[in-house]
């Protein structure tokens, strides 16, 4: 299988590069820029993409990869910092621009033969840089420019080395995907063979070969990731899969019943349901720090899951619904160049004495790819297209102390948000929509009497990938219905607010 290696130099857009490559049906992997030449050779890439990054190539501690990667004889595309790096390593001149170029720019193409083949008219692109290639390295030629960047793109066709100063991976470069596909298809001669059907066939074969006649234990949450993983593994090994659903008391309304109905009754998957609400809430009592909440929930989950897994008897493998962004961010936490915003408890959170071998069939996929695989496997839309839900559940949507009473309040309010969003048809058009229980009370009036009760915030955002998000412009009549229903139907809440902050600077979840 053709593989594109993406080297990460700390760009906020590195995952977007991977997504655009995958959307073009070409398999790719992301690794930190300092990966060894030996590891690169083991990956055996058919092409390499160098990401952008915040550094200056001429700085003393600039991130510089093993330059021998350029001698592997595979096409290389440098993006922003990646292009500057090529200019620097191949003896061109890279220096500060007179004016930092950030935002939209009109690209004037000088050469339409390969990288810009088939593009029409003025090419709008997105710039974000303070340095540029001031002088071309020997062997390179300019193939595009802008009014502020005399060398906005360059190539050494003989060595198949290409560079672009702008970011083709972002939506602000409308023809960016076409540019990337020209690199993949025309220059690197790769085939668009990375499809859900091929992925499912490969994983079923791999799971069967790895598991043999042994048992696999899986923690089923009812979310998209674990659900797709469960059905995929069940398709491969049937009754050898044993799923455990832990009810931690932090779930959405009706979640437990829905999981039992879909997986036990419809798919006939071996399913053990564990009521551990008291155990989780006892450990969370008095804890307000969100990162402490996450760690406690992760630890208690492992304790409960391990205890229940041992009751099933001998099992050699543990399955998880780990996704590729989790893997990437976990790598970043252990020496990669990208900042870690919050911890994941799928990757690296397992105790060493658990004595399971891991089965992670989705660890190569992004969320949208998981949904495509789920559709091919026949999972119902209500599961496949459900909005993301945080692993720690309602605990990170309850600001402050987590108690059963507060969980029940939020559960009811959140269900009303989901119900009204579905009735209006907006649920499937936004990335996420949910309620947050605030750590404050406010004065209200109900039936001519003064009340002093809880306030909730409604959060709804639009996004393509969750990396950036804008607050959703929900029609006032929908917000009005949500507010009226919450205040009338949920005793203990007398005020509803709407969050109009985008990501960045805010995050999607409040904690």
Image (spheres, rainbow, N blue to C red):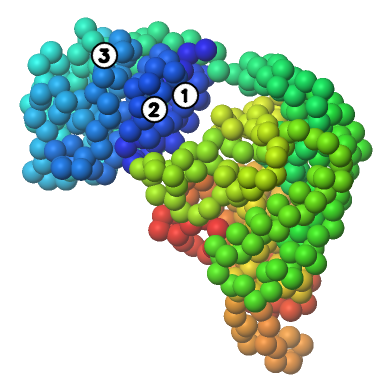
Tell whether label 3 touches label 2 (CB within 8 Å): no
> Number of callouts in the render?
3
Mark 2 vs mark 3, foreground winner is 3
Q: Earlier in the sequence, mark 2 or mark 1?
A: 2
Q: Residue 348 location in percent, x, y? A: 57, 45
Would you say residue 479 is visible in this rendering?
Answer: no
Q: Secondary structure at mark 1?
A: strand
- Quadrant in the rendering for residue 268: top right
Residue 13 vertical position relative to residue 455 in the rendered view, above or below: above
Q: Residue 403 location in percent, x, y? A: 72, 73
Say the numbered circle drawn on residue 365.
none
Closer to the camera, 492 or 109?
A: 492
Q: Which residue is mark 1?
A: 28
Q: Could you tell me which residue is drawn at 80 percent across and 35 percent down?
A: 315
Q: Could you tell me which residue is drawn at 62 percent across and 38 percent down?
A: 322
What separation in Å lies between label 2 and label 3 (alpha carbons)?
A: 16 Å
Q: Could you tell me which residue is drawn at 80 percent across and 67 percent down?
A: 278
Q: Which residue is mark 3?
A: 71
Q: Residue 64 location in percent, x, y? A: 24, 33
Mark 1 vs mark 3, foreground winner is 3
């Amino acid at each position: 299988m053709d593989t594109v290696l993406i080297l990460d130099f700390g760009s906020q857009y590195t995952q977007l590069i991977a997504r655009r490559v995958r959307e073009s049906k070409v398999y790719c992997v992301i690794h930190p820029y300092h990966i060894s030449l030996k590891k690169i050779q083991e990956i055996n890439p058919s092409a390499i993409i160098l990401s952008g990054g915040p550094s200056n190539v001429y700085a003393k501690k600039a991130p510089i990869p093993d330059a021998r990667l350029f001698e592997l004889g595979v096409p290389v595309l440098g993006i922003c910092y990646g292009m500057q790096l090529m200019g620097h390593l191949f003896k061109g001149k890279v220096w500060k621009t007179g004016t930092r170029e950030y935002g939209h720019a009109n690209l004037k193409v000088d050469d339409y033969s390969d990288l810009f083949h088939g593009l029409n008219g003025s090419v709008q692109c997105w710039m974000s840089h303070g340095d540029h290639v001031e002088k071309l390295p020997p062997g390179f030629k300019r193939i595009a420019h802008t009014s502020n960047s005399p060398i906005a793109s360059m190539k050494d066709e003989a060595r198949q080395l290409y560079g672009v100063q702008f970011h083709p991976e972002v939506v602000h470069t409308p023809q960016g995907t076409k540019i990337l596909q020209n690199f993949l298809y025309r220059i690197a001669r790769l085939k668009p063979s990375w499809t859900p059907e091929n992925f499912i066939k490969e994983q079923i074969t791999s799971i069967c070969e790895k598991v043999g006649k042994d048992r696999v234990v899986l923690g089923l949450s009812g979310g998209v990731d674990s659900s797709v993983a469960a059905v995929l593994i069940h398709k491969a090994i049937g009754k050898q899969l044993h799923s455990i659903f832990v009810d931690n008391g932090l779930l959405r309304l009706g979640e437990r019943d829905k999981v039992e109905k879909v997986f036990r009754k419809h798919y006939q998957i071996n399913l053990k349901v564990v009521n551990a609400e008291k155990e989780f809430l006892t450990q969370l009592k008095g804890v307000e720090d969100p990162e402490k909440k996450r760690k406690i929930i992760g630890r208690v989950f492992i304790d409960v899951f391990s205890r229940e897994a041992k009751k099933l008897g001998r099992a050699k493998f543990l399955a998880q619904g780990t996704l590729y962004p989790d893997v990437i961010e976990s790598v970043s936490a252990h020496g990669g160049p990208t900042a870690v915003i919050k911890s994941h408890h799928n990757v690296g959170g397992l105790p060493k004495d658990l004595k399971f071998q891991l089965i992670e069939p989705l660890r190569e996929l992004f969320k949208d790819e998981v949904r495509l695989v789920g559709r091919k496997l026949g999972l119902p839309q209500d599961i496949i297209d459900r909005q993301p839900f945080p692993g720690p559940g309602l605990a990170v949507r309850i600001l402050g102390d987590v108690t059963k009473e507060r969980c029940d309040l939020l559960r009811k309010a959140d269900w009303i948000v989901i119900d009204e969003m579905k009735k209006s048809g907006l649920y499937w058009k936004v990335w996420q929509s949910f309620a947050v229980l605030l750590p404050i009370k406010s004065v209200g009036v109900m039936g001519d009497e003064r009340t002093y009760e809880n306030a909730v915030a409604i959060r709804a955002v639009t996004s393509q990938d969750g990396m950036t998000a804008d607050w959703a412009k929900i029609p006032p009549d929908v917000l009005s219905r949500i507010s009226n229903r919450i205040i009338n139907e949920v005793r203990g809440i007398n005020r509803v607010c709407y969050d109009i902050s985008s990501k960045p600077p805010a995050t999607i979840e409040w904690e």
